[in-house]
Image (tube, rainbow, N blue to C red):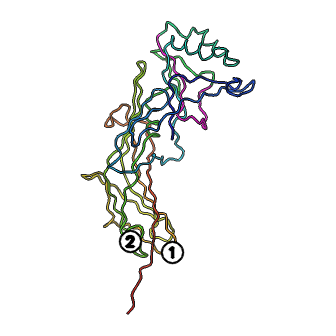
Amino acid sequence: MSLAIALGTGTPAYAGDPSYGGGDEGDVQPTPPSSGTDSGGSSGTGAIGAHIQISQSKTGGSGSSTSKATSSNANWKPPVCWYEPMYTPDEYEDFIKSSYKGAQEPAASYAKERADEDYHKGDKGLWWQVQFRNDDYTDACPVTPASWEIWVPPAQPKADPNQLTPEILSELAYNSTKLPTPPVVLNPSPDRLKVNLGTRVKFEGNFDRVWTTASINYKGVQMAATTVATPMALKVEAGTADADPQSCTYDLVKGDDGYTVDSKDSGCNVTYLRSSGTGTYPFKASITWKVTWTDSADPDGPARQPGLPDGLSTYEQNVTVKEIQAVNR
């Protein structure tokens, strides 16, 4: 996913603005922010919105493959947009006057409304501006065009529901998390599995918890949230109904070298009942991660509520299953 970086130059554009190719009427549309870089993963760093920084712990040993964490709850969605601190009153005046110079309606009225407020010059506080998680705008942002920026005083009576909070930061951190794919080794090897012979699954774990911190420190506004993903269980799926059982789940146990499992003495091992013939079966292994979050940059801080859904990381490989050839004498 390409995470957008806006450096305070984003301007609300309108469908009636000829520079946006619009007509004479329509709703406010966001000017796409500058393109950024992915966060998390191998680089361990990144940025979202205007001033939110993302950092992630190492996800495993050398050569470990990673994938973006997926939620076990299909209905869970990360925030589409939020307000971030952006301008002092003087900076906001400069922003409005330069960005809306010669603007047509309704942009002209928007700029006049801010000018009538005198940009809150002389007041203590900051102007917060809407920022977007993605730059494709495929999801609807709940922020209305009439309040592209909001004034936030030091003693705000009631925060806007879309104003940045540690909880929103935790959701952004979750969405940026990359997890190691399951390092499983099959015995027999994937190209030599046998019909009616149990498949031993060895999990060669060399990683521990994975945590991701989203933080902001801008114009006196400081907050952070850290999501912590702990591997809990390994599930393997045979990839065919011609297996008994079709899937097995093993609890992961923390050892000296990280979380691991060896199914050698387990009561559940996938046994293929039919050859894959000239083809293969899509064997899948997935890890379930328990995800918690703290309202700081400390992964060992107290877990906060509301909770986050479990995360999943998955690896698939094609396996070949052959009949055991008997020799008759």
Pointer 2 and pointer 1: residues touching (CB < 8 Å)?
A: no
Measured in 3D between alpha carbons, the distance from the residue under mark 2 to the one under mark 1, in whole angstroms, is 18 Å
Give how far across and how far down residue 311 sits, in percent.
44, 47
Q: Residues within 10 Å of mark 1 (few under 14, many from 20)?
A: few
Kindly identify the residue that appears in the image at 48 percent across and 21 percent down: 85
The magenta segment is 124-144
Which residue in the structure is indicated by mark 2?
A: 198
Q: Nearer the viewer, residue 73 or 255?
A: 255
Name the chief secondary structure element in magenta.
Answer: loop
The image quadrant of residue 139 is top right
Instruction: Please give the label number shown on residue 263.
Output: none
Q: Nearer the viewer, residue 170 or 37?
A: 37
User: Looking at the picture, which amino acid does disc 2 mark?
Assistant: Gly
Which residue is farthest right? 24
Q: Is residue 142 magenta?
A: yes
Asked if 17 appears above or below 210 in the picture, the reply is above
Which residue in the structure is indicated by mark 1?
A: 277
Nearest to viewer (mark 2 / mark 1)? 1
Q: Nearer the viewer, residue 183 or 22?
A: 22
Give how far across and how far down residue 314 sits, in percent.
44, 54
Give how far across and how far down residue 1 sits, in percent.
51, 41
Give how far across and how far down residue 5 sits, in percent.
50, 30
Which residue is farthest left? 256
The image quadrant of residue 292 is top left
Label 2 vs 1, first from the N-terminus = 2
